Amino acid sequence: MTTMTTSIARGKYHIWTVGCQMNQADSQRIQTMLDEMGWEETSMEQANLVILNTCSVRKAPEEKAHNQLAQLKHAKSKRSDLLVALMGCMIGSQKTIDELSKRYPHIDLFMKVEQADILPRFLEERWTPISGAGCLDIEFMPPDEYVPVEPIERILPTFATSTNTSGKRTVLPMAITPKMGERTAHYPTKIEPAKASPTAWLPVVLGCNKVCTYCIVPYRRGRERSRPVDELVTETASLVAKGAKELTLLGQTVEAYGLDLPGKPDLAELMKHLSQIDGLERIRFMTSYPRHMNDGMIERMAALPKVCEHVNIPVQAGDDEVLKRMKRGYTLDEYRDRITRLRALWPGVSLSTDIIVGFCGESEEEFQHTLDLLEEIRFDVVHVAAYSVRPGTVAARWEDDIPLAEKKRRLHAVEEVQARIAYELNQPLIGGVEEALVEEENDTHGRQQWKGRNRTNKLVFFPQPVEAGGESSGPEQSTPAARVIQPGDLVKVRIERATAWSLQGCVVAL
Ligand code: SAM
């Protein structure tokens, strides 16, 4: 007789996610794995497995994770059927893992997304429900009846174990760089969004090779690794089959895509392949880096009708000395040139940027240069953050000499200037017609309406149109061939109002 485990007990999971789009994309992948294993999504309080997908880019999201960990410690002291896993940017080297496991011995698993394939084995080994209802399902059958359908690939160990200070075994991720002959960590490719969303994230290049002095990302996400074109095409086709209409290609420096792949396919070439997928309507990409985006690449992207005219190209500061201290690797003139070329080669392109205020030693004059740059370039959107010290980065060794109150003042000054510029840029859109991809229903202003985005990434709000003669809450909503709008529809919206942050109008064609 052979004893075979045909299934393990299933539990309930909760994934808590903070941070950037990359984290959201990673959480979706983990969710797919757990769903496929038969685990059920639930609230944090009910879960047997809580996964915290963390962000370290600034101090505030990291503090949120520490709060969650403190609460989970309390929950775990009362429940033996609870496992806690940590992933995302808070996990870096073995040193950071050791520090965290010392501080939080109740963390059962430290997992990088590229080692997510340890999850099934981890759960099999570590989770046993306390109630009899979900105990292991062991089946007995004669050896000759056990015929594997396909040859089983030998699975090399995918995780290492070590002993923490309390003597409890802790599962640790593999080393970031496997040794010769070791299995190479890979990014989970299977993704089944929990809710069919018309918009999807596609991480195309993982990690970052830049060494910006303020930034923790390269220390936590490792060096750049591009995913092969065929893998991305397959994944996109699967996302589109499930209802995705718009894809955002993600990378810390997205134009670095392919530099490490055989034949060096670049971002524009990847977009060409993805453009051929029927049913995919729009392709977006972020985050751009001025020195990697050459003219040829822009021209080839601009020539692809599915690629949307929007570029998120962080400048971080409007002063050369600050840029030098940040080690951004370009001068303001080089940045300006890139913007000029972008606007010349890609008519109608909209631009967003990231700014950090209050970086080490930023004088009033240097800060004023950032405000001047905003007036000069007139970005459509600016994401502004107050500098926050990230232990382990180069800048963490320098004095964080701008008081918090002053950082806040500068942050609000940026917001104020930008609100005016964005308002001015959006006014000429009134009276025109924008194509919007419908994302979801929205009732934030006490008025039921649809939310979507135009090609240049501006938010567009509009009500459900009704047929001429039908019930309507306003004459402007009447359209000859109205039908119920669905997320994923591409609709034409006549813009009637514009603020700094959004456009509002009514549907003129479905
Ligand atoms: N790779 C992109 C880049 O910098 O070009 C984005 C990196 S990061 C995930 C997103 C944004 O967070 C950055 O553009 C920067 O403005 C902000 N950021 C990064 N480190 C920061 C820090 N220590 N303090 C405040 N903001 C920070």
Image (cartoon, grey):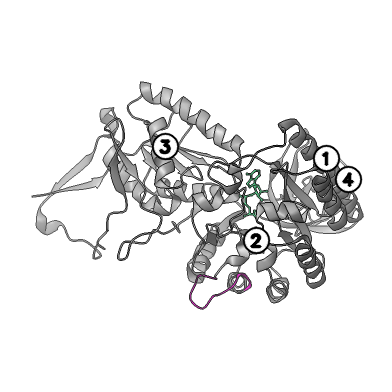
Q: Which residue is mark 1?
A: 413
Say the numbered circle drawn on residue 420.
4
Where residue 283 appears, as percent x and y from the top left, is 65, 63
Badge 1 marks a residue whose secondary structure is helix
- Alpha-carbon neighbours of circle 1 within 10 Å: few (<14), some, or many (≥20)? some
In the rendered structure, does residue 266 fall within the stretch colored magenta?
yes
Chief secondary structure of the magenta span? loop
Of 193 and 502, nearer the camera is: 502
The C terminus is located in which quarter? bottom right
Mark 4 vs 3, N-terminal side: 3
Tell me which numbered mark, 3 or 1, is placed earlier along the sequence.
3
- Residue that mark 2 sits on: 285
First reached walking from the N terminus: tag 1 or tag 4: 1
Q: Mark 2 or mark 3, which is nearer the start of the sequence?
A: 3
Looking at marks 2 and 4 on the same chain, the residue that comes earlier in the sequence is marked by 2
Compared with residue 234, is residue 427 higher up or lower down, i.e. above or below? Answer: above
The answer to whether marks 3 and 2 mark residues whose Cβ atoms lie closer than 8 Å is no
Q: CA distance from mark 4 to mark 3?
A: 46 Å
Q: Are marks 2 and 1 in contact (CB under 8 Å)?
A: no
Closer to the camera, 502 or 388? 388
Please tell me whether mark 4 or mark 3 is closer to you in this view.
Answer: 3
Separation of marks 1 and 4 at Cα, in angstroms:
11 Å
Instruction: Report the mark closest to the observer, 2 or 4.
Output: 4
Part of the protein shown in magenta: 259-268
Where is residue 59 shown, x and y percent of the image?
60, 37
From the viewer's perspective, is the residue at label 2 or at label 1 nearer? 1
